[in-house]
Image (cartoon, rainbow, N blue to C red):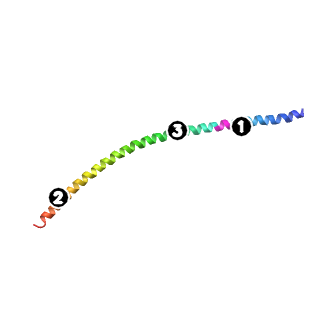
């Protein structure tokens, strides 16, 4: 009977190790599942941000074109005023 007692202790240890190993594996799988869910959410957020950035970049392009037009118009107006002032100064000075 004493030999049975010694034989059952390693069996119990193996069973407890197997059950604790299963618990560790289950815990690791649960953590992995949680991390994958977080990664999926982060990727969805990144996708939305990239779409928004694309829309904003297109808007900035239009805004840049609009400002370029304003600068060209202002340059033309100021250039014409400068020419008129030079003509008035040049024509009125010698007379």
Q: Upstream in the sequence, badge 1 or badge 2?
A: 1
Residue found farthest to the left:
95
**Where the C terminus falls, by quadrant?**
bottom left
Residue 46 counted in the magenta span: no
2 with respect to 41 (left or right): right
Which residue matches tag 1? 21
The residue pinned by badge 2 equals 84
Seen from this angle, which residue lies furthest bottom?
94
How far is disc 1 from disc 2 in space, using C-alphas? 92 Å
The residue tagged with tag 1: helix, strand or loop? helix
Taking 39 as reference, is 49 left or right? left
> In the picture, which quadrant includes the N terminus?
top right
How many numbered tags mark residues here? Answer: 3
- Residue on which disc 3 sits: 41
Q: CA distance from mark 2 to mark 3?
A: 64 Å
Direction right: furthest residue: 1
Marks 1 and 3, the one that precedes in the sequence: 1
| Residue 58 in the figure: left or right of residue 95 | right
Q: Mark 1: few, some, or many residues within 10 Å (few <14, many ≥20)?
A: few
Residue range (magenta): 24-28
* Magenta stretch secondary structure, dominant: helix
- For the residue labelled by badge 2, is the local secondary structure a helix, a strand or a loop? helix
- The residue shown at (69%, 36%) is 23
Q: Tell me the number on the disc at residue 92.
A: none
Can you give x and y, in whole percent of width and height, for residue 82 in the image? 20, 59
């Amino acid at each position: 009977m004493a030999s049975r007692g010694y034989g059952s202790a390693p069996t119990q240890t193996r069973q407890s190790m197997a059950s604790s190993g299963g618990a560790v594996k289950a815990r690791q799988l649960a953590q992995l599942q949680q991390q994958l869910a977080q990664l999926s959410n982060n990727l969805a957020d990144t996708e939305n941000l990239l779409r928004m950035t694309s829309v904003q970049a297109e808007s900035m392009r239009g805004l840049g074109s609009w400002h370029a037009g304003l600068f060209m118009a202002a340059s033309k107006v100021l250039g014409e005023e400068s020419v008129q002032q030079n003509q008035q100064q040049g024509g009125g000075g010698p007379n």
